[in-house]
Image: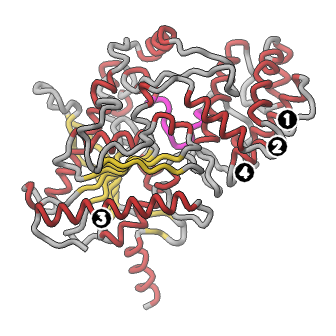
Amino acid sequence: MKCSVLFIEILIFGINFSSGEYVYNVNYVDVPVDHFSFTNNATFKLRYLINSSYWNNDGPIFFYTGNEGDINTFAQNSGFIWEIAPSFKALIVFCEHRYYGTSLPFGDKSFSDPIYVGYLHSAQALADFVYVIDHIQTLNGNGEDDSKNPVIAFGGSYGGMLSSWLRMKYPSSVLGAVASSAPILQFETPCDVFSSIVTSVFRTSSETNDCADVIKKSWSALRNVTGSAEGRQWLTKTWKLCDTLKDNDVEVLFNWLQDVYGNLAIVNYPYPTSFLSTLPANPVKAFCSKLPVTTHKPKPLIEELGRALNIYTNYTKQTKCVNITKSSWGGIDDFAWNFQACTEMIMPMCSTKRDMFEEQAWNYTKFSQDCYEVWKVHIARPNLAIREYGGKHLAAASNIIFTNGLMDPWSGGGVLQNVSRSVYAIVMPDTAHHLDLRGYNIADPPSVLNARYHIQVVIRKWIRTYYREYLNMYYH
């Protein structure tokens, strides 16, 4: 009897208590490779995850628009959706983005040639999502518009951009959207905003020193040491790099460091996590505490910086060496994302002398050349995303909630003010990247708890209006 009761509890709450992971069924649906062609009838299998434990057939569909990575990663790191689904009697769906995870249109050949990878585009992904939504509605016997379950789209970061665009482009398929840390304005935001916010996070996280200032000084120290074969050999040994640092690896190292600092700020959560890397609570503060710096001489400074970097690279003390050629993004697929960043998601980035990074201007010509060397594709329209989705012109949008933590480097490209009576902006001054979309933790600041409360209030308002006006039903 006890085993039966335990099984029922697991089914009801949608979580495997032995592992602490959310559970779901894995399904696939055939979707067109090209939704916008009348001559290409090719299809591929798109993966989606589904959990109906809380659903009563009449409830809404909570639909997560997949990001740049394996969909399981986002299903396990979006606890807020799982926590509110029971009170809404919602069906939970996490849909994978094409070209990520197992949803590869051409299998192993998907990235081998521009003729294959050219279908990696946000507009195609949005059409995939609509296709899956229609598929699920049909399975539930709701093929007609006047009987469909209301769909609320959720997404964080790029996924949040997609959820907001899904509502804008396909309002008949999606009733409303929650877009957490969605930098939809990043395309036309000053290029130094991201670096400036990262610098601010490191500066305010320092208790005994100006951590950002120490990092600023470290770039010249690193240039000094890596300028010789002997110095590169010393750095390889000191930082326990997996491969001996060569002259043409120096820029790779510098780019890797920039990513690590940015990622530390992005996942600067108030409790331990393993989203991008296994990290302690408040990882930027932990990093800065390891960087006291009593000297500005190059080698001692670099030694102390290496110890601080262990917070990101080897917090578990299980890593034997540091691989700077491996993505620092953890569960995020930076290879496929690079194609999108080179073709449609072109977000100008730079840093100034006021930032903790090396001063670097935005160089579109070099960016375009670098992209062509990797993908053999020329950038035809650098402002494609703005033309496709409207950029900052959101007056015609409706039923969208934008949430942003001001300690998130991507918040500089976020919607930080209400646009209209139905497009809301919720700002959390003391939080990092889409913390509100994660599950409850006792360390969550009041601003996050308040944001989650207001999100639920607005969603319930949307759904009540939908049931009353379209289905002539009362929803409570």
Q: Position of residue 259 (x, y in %)?
A: 61, 31
Q: CA distance from mark 3 to mark 4?
A: 42 Å
Foreground residue, 85 or 191? Answer: 191
Above or below — where is 22 with respect to 351? below
Dot 3, how many residues are within 10 Å of its Cα: few (below 14), some (14-19), or many (20+)? some
Query: Residue 461 in the image: x percent, y percent?
Result: 27, 63
Examine the rendering and report whether any part of residue 258 can be seen: yes
Are the residues flagged by discs 2 and 1 in contact, CB closer than 8 Å?
Answer: yes
Which badge, 2 or 1, is on the more N-terminal residue?
2
CA–CA distance between discs 2 and 3? Answer: 46 Å
Whole-number angstrom distance, CA of label 4 to CA of label 1: 19 Å
Picture disc at residue 460: 3
Q: Magenta residues?
A: 327-337
> Which numbered mark, 4 or 1, is in the foreground of this view?
1
Front-lying residue, 299 or 60: 60
Residue 280 coordinates in the image, percent (x, y): 69, 53
Q: Is 39 drawn above or below residue 332 in the view shown?
A: above
